[in-house]
Amino acid sequence: MDRMTRGFVVRLVLAVIAAIAIAASIVAATSAPITWTMRGEEWELLAPRNLALLAVAPLLLLGGWRSLADLPRAQLALGYVVRLALLALLALALARPARTADATRVAVVFLVDVSDSVSDADLARARERIDAAWRARGEDVVRVVTFARDARVLEIDDEVPPIARHDDGAGSDLASALQLAYGLYPPGHLRRAVVLSDGAQTEGDALAEAQRAAELGVRIDHAPFTEGPPGEIAITSLSLPDALQAGQPFTVRVRVFASQPTTARLRLYQGETLNGLDGVRDLELAAGDNEIALRSVVHVPGPVTYRAELEPRGDDRFQPNNRFATTVVVPGRPAVLYVEGTASAATHLARALTAGELDVDVRSPRAMPTSAAELERFDFVILSDVPADQVSASAQDALDRFVRSGGGFLMAGGEQSYGLGGWRGTRVERLLPVRMEGERRRDQPSLALALVIDRSGSMSGEKMEAAKQAAQATAELLSAQDYLEVVGFDAQAERIVRMQSAGNRIAIQRDIGRMAPRGGTAIFPALDTAFQDLSITRARLKHVILLTDGQTQESGLPELVSVMRAEGITVTTVGIGADVNRSLLTQLADLGGGRSYFTTDPRNVPRIFMQETTTVTRNDVVEDYVRARVVAPADFLRGVDVASAPFLRGYVATRARPAPAQVILESELGEPLLARWRVGLGWSLAWTSDVKARWSADWLRWGAFSRFWVQLVREHMRERERHELPMRAEVIGDEARVVVDAIGDDDEFVNGLASTLVVEGPMGARSSDRIREEHVLRQTAPGHYEARFPLSRYGSFVLRAEHRRDERMIAESTSELVRPYPREYARLEPDLALLDRISDVARGRRDPSPDVLFDPAGESVRRREEVWSPLLFAALALFVLDLLLRRVRLLDRGFRAPR
């Protein structure tokens, strides 16, 4: 190693030692930020330890010492200075220098309520106020937030745009608007907020949020909306006495708010029908709250829903708040719902059951409840001589759920019941312990049936498929003794199935399945074809079923049907769709000695065909004196001597289903008179005779008639002896919270239950608008079970919970949940007091002018501003200069480059 190299190594070691010493001393001396004052401003280094980068300076000097660049000494020296300055600037920038000064600029965020309770005039005035502030802002900042159920930022370009409402204005959440505003304030500005609202909040806690805003340095002023919606009326409450008794009149109180004097009509519904004692009231409403008292009485115990509806006669902006419903449970005796097809025939059985300490509610088929929740008030349901087309699909579904959840059900016979009433293939038939088909007896005449079916172009799609299904189902009903023909028609008639024995089922089904829609509509040729074929067919009964969906003005049809009737051929008509010629089809059915049916739903056509075929054949009816005989023991027959009972004069023939269905009473022909089986938790029974003065005329005078029916109902009705656990429910925002506290008779917590909650409602609404949901009640504490779920609809909801242990139900709970309409439509008057309290908490004022808004009023905000970015730009400039000093001879004027 030569002398020069040794000298460099020594200098390098000394430079490294110096760098380490400098770095260590800087780190030791800068454990906390360094502060100083300069020109009245406070300065500080937030990360002073980064000054340790200056320790690289000795190494830079050493590098320059060994430079081989052929540059003037002055330029080399200047390069050293530039690099050291660059290093100093980088170290200083990394140390994060900052200055702190007082700032008086103001940032104002306007919070504009655009919920439904705010009038258009108030929104227009809000825009004027914001526009005035925008023009007066100077160097200050203006932002706008609009809010209803949620909050949104309104973007402003050159001028304030119109204040737009939100799509969902059925709510007002000022607290969320304040939370959104916090992120809109630029640093170093005094924070101001101006609330433009009526103060009618429905979500959140604006007062608590105002306290938080004050802690964050936000001053909240307000400019209240005071106009409110014009001409508004609303039902604000519907209350009933806490304790009700079946049969005892009581008062229902309805509170109605009116923003100005007006008139309206009030309707009160009990269940799905008008309240009997006081159902309609014309009201003269004064401005403010009005209380209306209406008399009512509940005859049947159990849950009953009351619904009040207002029909305004003047201006009314919000319709949802014109409806209010609530549900109450009326204690009392076991309740029976008796649905009778002929109201005048219900007297005998209703009187017998009432004498047995049962509460009986007699209704027409159209008034049958359409939800399981409405059926909860009953323990047993009797459906007597009612055709299927008078019981809606929703009512049948409700009956199915009622039975499966523990209720009792009995279908009684009659000329409109079982197969005669079109119940084949329905949900109710699947509930019953019997099939709706009887044995064909020798004395029953044979039938020749012609189905005349419209296959024009308008019958395409669902209509055609329904017609084919109806024809195929009809073919299945007929026996081999019967004859069947199917005539399809458009502009011409065609024999789809030629007149033949109904025993040829496979061929008949195949030919019907090939039927397809075509052209126009001409009924006469098709009906005449059926007439000609029936005239030469040997049968005791001859019948035509005509199906069409269109208009026809053909002449000669009434005359043709009259001739057919004279020849012993009857005609029934079925019209499908809204455009069918009802008057003509009704006339043809009357002339033909048949019946006329009309439906707009193609799915009803198969049921209509089956009902009509059953009626014509009368296969299901046995009209003869028969005696009931006991074939299986049953507890409810104790004390009832069925052997001494008088004759029945008829019944509907059925077949018992296989076990576990059980026939209790049968006829002398071995056909069921009374059968039963378990369905879910409940009982379903079939009584194939009637319960009125036709087939049971002699039974009505039998001394044991009342005892027989009372004991039958009591044995099969709903069991209500289970332990009742208290349930409470509340609505929190758009969510429902249901709580059950399970405490046993020994005052100990009941743990480990498998609890299921069923929610059904809104009660009183159309079945298509109702929901039925199941939720799990989860145990969250000893004896404490809870469920939370979103609630998107409004009205009165019935809650029922089943509590099981080891798959056995040991307790139940019932309650109601009322959410009549969005809270926005209940808060119809401004809450100015809330706005005043918010401003008091957040040091604000009422109705501030733009000058006041932007006046710092002696306030200032300490603003810390980091100033490292100018240092980085300066360092970048020095870096460029350093490159020039390294590459270009700048300070040697006498230098000439070699040629």
Image (spheres, rainbow, N blue to C red):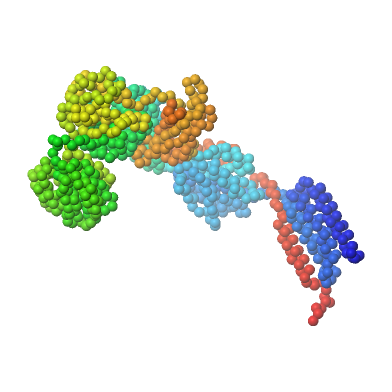
Q: Quadrant of the C terminus?
A: bottom right
Asked whether 831 or 248 is in front, the reply is 248
Q: Residue at x 77, y 60 (%)?
A: 86
Asked if one can make out residue 567 in the rendered structure from this viewpoint, the answer is yes
Q: Quadrant of the N terminus?
A: bottom right
Asked if one can make out residue 512 in the rendered structure from this viewpoint, the answer is no
Q: Residue at x 81, y 52 (%)?
A: 23
Asked whether 693 or 34 is in front, the reply is 693
Q: In x, y percent, where is residue 573? A: 18, 45
Q: In x, y percent, where is residue 421? A: 23, 37
Q: Residue farthest to the bottom?
A: 899
Q: Is residue 429 left or right of residue 790?
A: left
Q: In x, y percent, where is residue 819? A: 43, 36
Q: Is residue 241 above or below residue 575?
A: above
Asked whether 491 or 342 is in front, the reply is 491
Q: In x, y percent, where is residue 424? A: 26, 39
- Residue 811: which quarter of the image? top left
Q: Residue farthest to the right?
A: 3
Q: Is residue 477 above or below residue 337?
A: below
- Residue 679: which quarter of the image? top left
Q: Is residue 346 left or right of residue 181?
A: left
Q: Is residue 138 left or right of residue 660?
A: right
Q: Residue at x 48, y 36 (%)?
A: 788
- Residue 767: which quarter of the image? top left
Q: Residue at x 85, y 55 (%)?
A: 18
Number of disc labels: 0
